[in-house]
Amino acid sequence: MVFGNLTREAVRAARTTCLVAVVATFAGLSATAVRAETLADALVSAYNHSGLLDQNRALLRVADEDVAAAGAALEPVLRWTASFTQSVGRGQSSVGFGVQNSESLIAQGRLIAELLIYDGGATALGIEVAKETVLATRQSLIGVEQQVLQRGVQAYMGVIEATEFVQLRQNNQRVLTQELRAAQNRFEVGEVTRTDVALAEAQLAQARSGLASAQGNLAIAVEEYRNVIGRKPGRLSPPPKLPKLGSDIEAAKGLAVRAHPSMRSVQHRVAATELAIKRAEASKRPTVGLQGILSMSEDLNSSNFSTGASVGINAAGTIYQGGARSSAVRAAQARRDAERGNLHVVRHNIQQNVGIAYAQLSSARASIEASDRQIRAARIAFRGVREEATLGARTTLDVLDAEQALLDAEAARISAQSQLYNAAYAVLAATGRLTAQDLRLPVQQYDVSEYYNLVKDSPTAKSDQGKQLDRVLKSLQKN
């Protein structure tokens, strides 16, 4: 035996040591398994889980492809055409050999090369319009990222708030159950009337109703969390310290006007409409192109064939089109004016949102301070009223009213804390700083330039750049 040469005490000690080691190991594994989820963990999951982000990333790639499509108009175009024509005829010649039948099968092929030389700059301006649209779409993607993370904060705080409300209601129900027993005992000895017992029963029934409502709200918060974060919430850590926020509202508004993604997006869209006006005006100018044709024709029923080649410069222009081109210019100007008006609206909305977020933050802070004082006072009052009631100096109604006042104060404190965190992160969102980069979340961020750099030069599928693009697309589809 392994322990044959050991004393009984040594064997017992060795077994104890092994048992302690095993218990410690399982305790460590258990502690790791039930580690509380933090707000940062939830935001990472919300970022990785969001289908809305995936959708808008795909829309950004569509805008990237528009740049490639616009740039392709400046590249040479190589086309081919082919045809087979079967001809059957019957006729008589003037030299008189009688009626003769004729039949031919003509195969024709053409290889056509075209290159745009001049179009008044319309194509080049179209490329610039597409580039500005890409920049605007990138900023819209950042705006969507802010929405996803802000909703993640709200879902996290919603579960914490609902959980605390359930615990508060459960504690309130336990206290009122004790108050009902006390009222029944005092009723049996004649210290109170049946009315006091009925009041306690009514208050307990109300507490049970409140608990059921709180449990329902918790179930709703859990479903919201599952939708936003991507999984059912486990044990959540208390919210962390509030993010650092400046106290100068006007400075925050100025920062938001400069840096908010919605503002930057509409600025790029205004620039795109300005370029679109120039493109519409350039479209009035004539176009000049270079064309080369290589052709071949062969009669498959005989030995007749012909080949040819031609190179030429073609010029074209529109003299009159019923005012359609002038209308296109005016429409482009109207779209520019609309975007300028939208820029004005977005600027003021951003400033308003910053002001509202700071007002909500200040209100929540004041509510927490007031609730803390109210809770301390209500707790002292409740204990005093309950002691006085045991001495006959207070009625059961006084005790129940004091308990309700304490419950209201504690509920207000829970709501104020949730509002405080939501308002703090709303300030970040209103100033354009609620992003994975600003929050330093450990996520694989989407590189908005990688796909653009691969497609901007309109690569073909068989080129090295096209093959690299295929690998990128397959990677995106897997994710």
Image: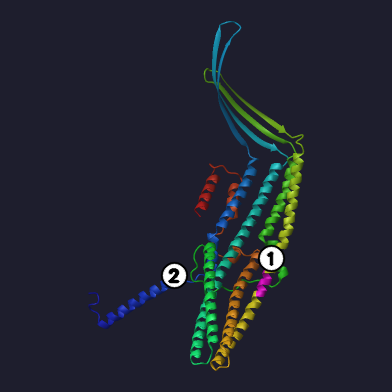
Q: Position of residue 360 (x, y in %)?
A: 66, 71
Disc 1 target residue? 353
* Inter-mark Cα distance, 1 to 2: 41 Å
Q: Is residue 245 visible?
A: yes
Query: In the image, which disc is placed on residue 393?
Result: none
Q: Residues within 10 Å of mark 1 (few under 14, many from 20)?
A: some
Mark 1: which amino acid? Asn
Front tag of 1 and 2:
1
Q: Is residue 269 left or right of residue 181?
A: right
| Magenta stretch holds residue 321 | no
Q: In this view, does 40 lie above or below 472?
A: below
Looking at the picture, how far across and down is residue 16, in whole percent?
32, 79
- Upstream in sequence: badge 1 or badge 2: 2
The answer to whether one can see residue 38 in this image is no
Element under disc 1: helix
Q: Is residue 186 above or below residue 362?
A: below
- The secondary structure that dominates the magenta segment is helix
Residue furthest out toward the top:
96
Label annotation for residue 33: 2
- Give coordinates of residue 134: x percent, y percent: 64, 51
Classify the position of the N terminus by image quarter.
Answer: bottom left
Looking at the image, residue 50 sits to the left or right of residue 73; the answer is left
- Name the foreground residue: 31 vs 288: 31
Question: Is disc 2 placed on a helix, strand or loop?
Answer: helix
Residue 361 lies in the magenta stretch: yes
Task: Say above or below: 320 vs 467.
Answer: above
Q: Give the range drawn in magenta.
A: 357-363
Residue 177 horizontal side relative to residue 321, left or right? left
Residue 28 horizontal/vertical position (percent)? 42, 73
Q: What residue type is labelled 2?
A: Ala
Q: Residue at x 58, y 77 (%)?
A: 411
